[in-house]
Image (cartoon, rainbow, N blue to C red):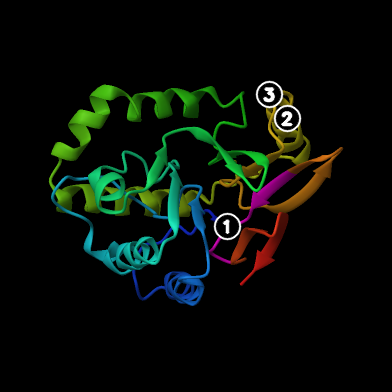
Amino acid sequence: MKAIFLADAHLLQPEADNYRRLLSFLKNQRGSITHLILLGDIFEFWLGYRHAVFAAYVPLLEELRRQRQAGTELVFVEGNHDFHLGPYFSETLACRIFPDHGTLELDGRRIYIAHGDLVNKTDRGYRLLRRVLRSRLSRRLLPLAPVDWAWTVSRWGSRQSSSRKDESYRLPEELLVGFARERFAEGHDVVVLGHHHLPLIKRIDDKLLLCLGDWIEQDSYGLLEKGVFSLQRA
């Protein structure tokens, strides 16, 4: 078994350096991995339409299709930039989707996977916005927006976020460890998180916390191979 865990590429345009690097990495891995586990914010913006996909993401979607065709199982935990993944992922890619978090059983380990945006329990404003955007009503209404309009609005939102240079997702390590301990108490052996753009692998007693970093500056990812977890850089 060889499983790769990725998060936080925030891909936008195919000509961007991190987009090209991620495509090259995935192509080199094609046919050699059993599981590709994506922990959210792979896209800077995604909304799952039934009969359309955003043109900028066609190269990555095609690579994911080829990974699936090569026998790789695809798993996606929705992030705060890419949720309501829709039928392209669930049907065309036969991807296993977790809207919030999930548990995988791999190599005899019980692995908790989540994007990581719910670690900070005190961020009530974000949690409220998240509930609204992920509600059943939003799931029905958002895909009714014209594709070009949704993309334009998302680009505006991305520029606003970049201009603020918000670092609020970078939580202290002790909060991540505390969150992991709660998951260990539920019976998990490993906790894997994205969102915080913090590459971290930490033994906690006989358990493991793995934070994936990002695919913007760090090109870091988690690897499970022959029963051993590691944090790698491409």
Whether residue 28 sits left or right of residue 92 in the image: it is right
In the image, is residue 33 above or below residue 203?
Answer: below
Q: Residue 230: x and y, percent? A: 72, 59
Q: Which residue is mark 2?
A: 184
Magenta span: 209-217
Amino acid on which disc 3 is placed: Glu
Q: Residues within 10 Å of mark 2 (few under 14, many from 20)?
A: many
CA gap, disc 2 and disc 1: 21 Å
- State which quadrant residue 113 falls in: top right
Q: Is residue 133 magenta?
A: no
Q: Residues within 10 Å of mark 1 (few under 14, many from 20)?
A: many
Which residue lies at the image location 40% right of the left edge and 41% below the top edge?
A: 97
Q: Which residue is mark 1?
A: 3
Q: Nearer the viewer, mark 2 or mark 1?
A: 1
Whether residue 215 sits left or right of residue 231 in the image: it is left
Q: Is residue 210 magenta?
A: yes
Q: Which mark is residue 186?
A: 3
In the image, is residue 190 above or below residue 16?
Answer: above
Q: Residues within 10 Å of mark 3 (few under 14, many from 20)?
A: few
Give the number of marks.
3
Mark 3 vs mark 1: which is more N-terminal? 1
What residue occupies the far right of the structure in this picture?
A: 205
